[in-house]
Amino acid sequence: MSRGNTDMLVLSLINEMDMYGYQIIDELVKRSNHTFDLKTGTLYPLLHLLEQKKYVKSYEAEASTGKIRKYYQITDAGRKYLLLKQREWEEYANAVNRVIAGGVLLAGI
């Protein structure tokens, strides 16, 4: 999985709701049926990079367990970047599907 696609997946999750690191990992595993299983050594550097680029911001808050956790929230710049990555992915997926289908765009894709 390329870094750009990982960016897109992580931003897609936190676009729905603010999440902390392990929550992002768990949700990605669940939604992908264990296809995407990020390690903390991959996720946290990615989150720091997204934060440096101003695509996400972080804050600390108390979780339901009473623990203080660092949550990540998408920014307006992050939403714009996410939309760009989603469009790039759609173009790529459509091109792959046209090759597989012999040059015909598959319906519903």
Image (cartoon, rainbow, N blue to C red):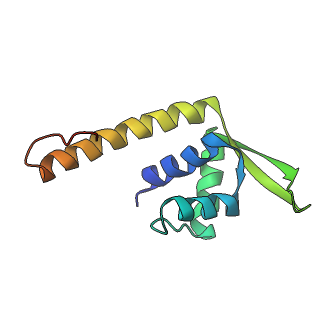
Query: In front here: 30 or 55?
Result: 30
Nearest to the observer: residue 107 or residue 20 = 107
Q: In x, y percent, where is residue 6?
A: 48, 54
How far across and down, in percent of the image, does residue 1 sit?
40, 61
From this viewpoint, which residue is outermost toward the left?
A: 102
At 86% from the left and 50% from the top, the residue drawn is 61
Task: Give percent across and percent down for residue 19.
Answer: 70, 51
The x and y percentages for residue 18 are: 71, 45
For image coordinates 84% across by 50% down, the residue present is 60
Q: How many discs mark residues in the rendered view?
A: 0
Residue 75 or residue 66, whichever sits in front: 66
Q: Is residue 30 above or below residue 99?
A: below
In the rendered image, the quadrant that contains the C terminus is top left
User: Is residue 49 left or right of 2 when viewed as pictured?
Assistant: right
Q: Nearer the viewer, residue 77 or 107?
A: 107
Quarter occupied by residue 66: bottom right
- Residue 56 seen in this snapshot: yes
Q: Residue furthest right?
A: 66
